[in-house]
Image (cartoon, rainbow, N blue to C red):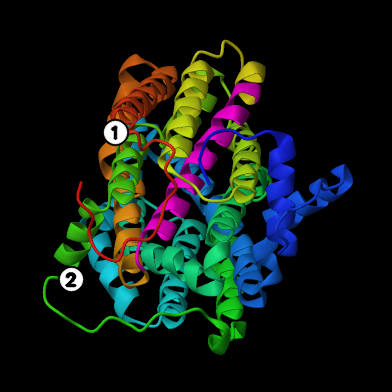
Amino acid sequence: MSDTTRTAETLGTDVAADATGSGGTGPVPRTGRGRALAGRTFSSLQVPNYRRFFTGMAVSATGQWLQLVAQGWLVLQLTGSGVALGTVTALQFLPVLLGGAWGGVLADRLDKRKLLAVTQTVAGALALILAIATVADLATIGLVYVMAFALGCVNAVDNPARRSFIAELVPAENITNAVSLNTTVMTSSRIVGPALAGVIIGAVGIAACFFLNAVSFLAVLVALWRIRPAELHTVPPQRRAPRQVRDGMRYAAGVPDVRVALIMTGVISTMAFNYQVVVPLLAERTFGGDATTFGLLLSATSVGSLLGALFTAGRGTIGVGFLVVSAAAFGTAMTVAGLAPTLALAFVLVVPMGGAGAAFVSGANSLLQIATAPEYRGRVMALYTVVFLGSTPIGGPIVGAIAEAFGPRWGFIVGGLTTIAVAAVVALSRARRGALGAPAAASASPAPA
């Protein structure tokens, strides 16, 4: 399937054929097309193991956004500094940058379900420590730095294991759908979590958000316990061997679609996906808002993100062309949102920004899962985690400094223009090779560049 835009009628026929198993030999009634599209969009939820994991992650992801908003607001209260916000973000993701590749090796070697149980338990304990410290009035910027770094160490292992585990929960033909629905969990939680955090902080205080996040990890642990191992689509664990990290990097560099997706994600994540740095500054300094304004702006972004993730979930095979289009749309929307003259218009403009951003993230994640051979999936998803999250220690302080020096709007504008430039470079390069719309396919060994 190419990444060119198809007509609604063609899409309806393809979806009906996929949903029913028929060859699509006859026309599909219009009402049937809508039901078939909806069925395809949520098809992975018919798999019991995925449904359990999806539900647990939905609860936990909301809790994590409560903590992210509370942490950002706590840092502003303690320091009033955009650079400090960027530093906390950098410390939280620095371990992913430095150790994420080894986390992928663990994901390929170990039982992912058991590994996730350990990482989720530790993350919950860290949230509880921060909650207790805040209640006891012991929270300092130094403690926040330490807790952020510790959580980053957990995420360096958790993220590649969790992302590659999704491919074991569903059949191969459902991977794109499952990955996109997983993105809807994260983006839906961003609709509920930040808005709820703003209300909780105003009514009860910052510590309550940390406590609720600690409790939310129980939902994931219960889901992991209820998953049936016999129904997982696992691959044999990789044996311990020398140079496995280097081998994974060599593999990723040798598969063109994997290489392009990782490069695009790395550059765009460094400069554009720094909402936790730019949005609180935009809310407070540009529009004179408070924690509620911050939370609502993130929620508005997440409304668009949910729509973008659902759109991607309803697609078939993802290719580089989809990444180029979604990145160009994301960059354009981000640049325009940075120029919004009023808070009301900013609320409107961040919706398409969030939608295009989520489409790019879902698309890149799906393409990597599909184009990667199963025995390398943990390591490739670790590299994705490194470039997606690990780039934040670089981008967070840079964007924070830009926002401090030139104003919060420029945090969005610089990120948007960078994203547009990346999309243009990849489009021109792939167009010359005639490979822009080529569908992804798993490569068992590195292909020539």
Is residue 307 visible in the rendered image? The answer is: yes
Magenta span main SS: helix
Instruction: Estimate the spatial distance between the alpha carbons at disc 2 and disc 1, rounded to whole Å.
Output: 31 Å
Task: Indicate whether residue 360 is drawn in magenta.
Answer: yes
Query: x, y percentage for residue 375?
Result: 32, 73
- Label 2, secondary structure: give it: helix
Q: Residue furthest top?
A: 341
Q: Which residue lies furthest to the front in this view?
A: 25
Residue marked by disc 2: 244
Q: What range of the chain is rendered magenta?
A: 348-373
At label 1, the amino acid type is Arg
Q: Residue furthest bottom?
A: 230
Q: Which of 259 and 270 is in front in this view?
A: 259
Q: Nearer the viewer, residue 107 or 91?
A: 107
Q: Nearer the viewer, residue 205 or 438?
A: 438
Q: Which residue is drawn at 62% across and 84% down?
A: 226
| Disc sitting over residue 89 in the figure | none
Residue marked by disc 1: 433
Residue 298 lies left or right of residue 379; in this view the side is right
Query: x, y percentage for residue 261?
Result: 35, 45
**In the figure, residue 112 lies in which quadrant?**
bottom left
In the depicted structure, whether residue 161 falls above or below residue 270: below
In the depicted structure, whether residue 172 falls above or below residue 203: below
Q: Residue at x 49, y 47 (%)?
A: 318
Q: How many marks?
A: 2
At label 2, the amino acid type is Gln
Query: x, y percentage for residue 19?
Result: 72, 60
